[in-house]
Image: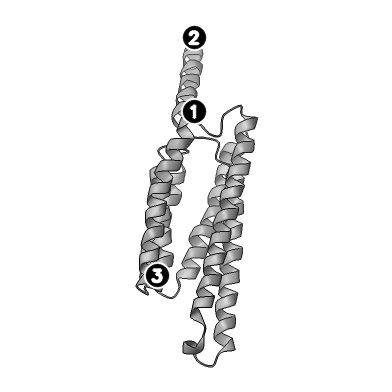
């Protein structure tokens, strides 16, 4: 057997092993759309905050609880849209490549991604309960970065870089309390668009 044939077989074996141990049907375009959703959400939130501040002569008169509910609603809407988009586009990609969207590999990915994500969500509730509002945005970036870093073992390894950058960004944001929304827009918006575009060009256009 020629050397080229050996290399071809080794490549096929490696591909089969990756498919059996990693969920590779993540859509890069879904990352782009998630970033766009996040940017729209951040701009809307910024508009609401400025509008409330301009509508009252004193910050203490702002009905802050209502504003917080509005901001929470925006964050949840961005999250729901991002998840639905990822599921729909990943299912489409999996069907195109003849793979299953829901199997043991995707279950491992979901479990390992969810643990740090839900831990971070609970910790954010504790921060809110104790009125540490300024630390919520940095915390979401840090725990999301940890979730991506852990999940990279069960999906495309490139996602680890997204995780590392978000962790660093979140740590920097802890030193700039009051600018969390801008860091949030960079982490969940701009970085997702860049990451999604790179992944789309690398994997989806084949």
- First in sequence: mark 1 vs mark 3: 1
Query: Is residue 95 depicted above or below 46 in this figure?
Result: above
Question: Which residue is denoted by mark 2 in the rendering?
Answer: 2
Question: Which residue is denoted by mark 1 in the rendering?
Answer: 19
From the top left corner, tell me how far across and down residue 200 is, in percent.
Answer: 59, 43
Query: Is residue 55 depicted above or below 67 in this figure?
Result: below
- First in sequence: mark 2 vs mark 3: 2
Mark linked to residue 128: 3
Query: Is residue 46 depicted above or below 6 in this figure?
Result: below
From the top left corner, tell me how far across and down residue 53 is, in percent.
Answer: 54, 85
Does the rendering let one see residue 56? yes
Name the residue furthest top.
Answer: 1
From the top left corner, tell me how far across and down residue 75 is, in percent.
Answer: 53, 63
Query: What whole-number distance in Å separates the C-alpha atoms at marks 1 and 3?
Result: 41 Å
Whether the residues at callouts 2 and 3 have beta carbons within 8 Å, the answer is no
Local secondary structure at mark 1: helix
Foreground mark, 2 or 1, reads 1
Foreground mark, 1 or 3, reads 3
- Most foreground residue, 129 or 193: 129
Whether the residues at callouts 1 and 3 have beta carbons within 8 Å, the answer is no
Query: What whole-number distance in Å separates the C-alpha atoms at marks 2 and 3?
Result: 65 Å
Q: Name the residue rendered at 44%, 66% in the picture.
A: 137
């Amino acid at each position: 057997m020629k050397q080229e044939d050996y290399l071809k077989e080794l490549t096929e074996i490696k591909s089969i092993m990756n498919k059996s141990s990693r969920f590779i049907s993540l859509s890069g375009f879904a990352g782009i759309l998630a970033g766009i959703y996040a940017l729209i959400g951040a701009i809307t939130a910024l508009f609401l905050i400025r509008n409330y501040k301009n509508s009252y002569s004193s910050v203490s008169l702002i009905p802050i609880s209502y504003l917080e509910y509005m901001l929470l609603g925006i964050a949840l809407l961005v999250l729901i849209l991002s998840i639905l988009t990822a599921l729909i586009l990943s299912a489409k990609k999996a069907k195109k490549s003849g793979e299953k969207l829901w199997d043991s590999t995707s279950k491992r990915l979901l479990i390992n991604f969810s643990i740090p994500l839900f831990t971070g969500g609970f910790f954010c509730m504790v921060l809110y309960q104790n009125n540490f509002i300024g630390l919520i945005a940095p915390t979401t970036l840090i725990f999301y970065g940890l979730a991506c870093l852990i999940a990279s073992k069960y999906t495309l390894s490139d996602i680890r870089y997204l995780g590392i950058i978000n962790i660093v960004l979140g740590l920097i944001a802890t030193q700039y309390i009051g600018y969390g929304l801008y860091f949030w827009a960079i982490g969940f918006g701009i970085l997702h668009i860049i990451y999604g575009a790179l992944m789309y060009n690398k994997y989806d256009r084949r």
